[in-house]
Image (cartoon, helix red, strand yellow):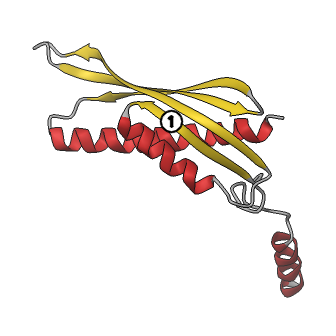
Amino acid sequence: MKKISLFILILFISHCGYTPIYNIDNKTKIKINILSTEGDKKINNLLVSDIKKISRNDFEKEFDVKINTSFIKLIIAKDTKGVASDYQLKVISTFEIIKNNKNEIISFQEQINIKNNTNLFEQKKYENSIKITFAKSIVDKLLEKLTISE
């Protein structure tokens, strides 16, 4: 009896209909041409790199894009000595999408509050990892917006 119920359980689990969300076969085939970039160079380089990864040669939709980004680091709290203890990191990315002589402007914003680290090297390293995460999130949102459009 245990063998039969184990077999039935395995049979149902293996045919549950699971497919990965980010499977490349499920994505709409799009090509994104980057016309220009302005603003924060580090964020722009990350965005361009991630966009090139998703852009395909066998495309169904093609978009021309101009990118403008800004990275803002604000002090949101100070300790008793007046030294910054908390920061807010914010990235604002604006995409001008040109398709069929129509321009559409889309803007995405990511932000996080972080504590100040006394080790400057570790602080910069952490901020760079946050920038990478922000760039991936923004590209995911852009891809979602472009696949929904039209």
Residue tagged 1: 36
Residue 20 figure quarter: bottom right
Question: Is label 1 in a helix, a strand or a loop?
Answer: strand
| Image location of residue 18, percent across then percent down | 80, 62
Quarter holding the C terminus is top right
Up-down relation of residue 9 to residue 103 (above or below): below
Q: Residue at x 72, y 45 (%)?
A: 62
| Image location of residue 115, percent across then percent down | 28, 29
Q: Residue at x 49, y 43 (%)?
A: 47
Q: In the displayed structure, does residue 6 sit left or right of residue 115?
A: right
Q: Residue at x 37, y 37 (%)?
A: 41
Q: In the displayed structure, does residue 48 sit left or right of residue 77?
A: right
Q: In the displayed structure, does residue 47 sit left or right of residue 106?
A: left
| Image location of residue 89, percent across then percent down | 37, 26
Pick out the residue farthest to the left.
81
* Count of numbered circles on the image: 1
Residue 85 figure quarter: top left
Q: Residue at x 56, y 53 (%)?
A: 52
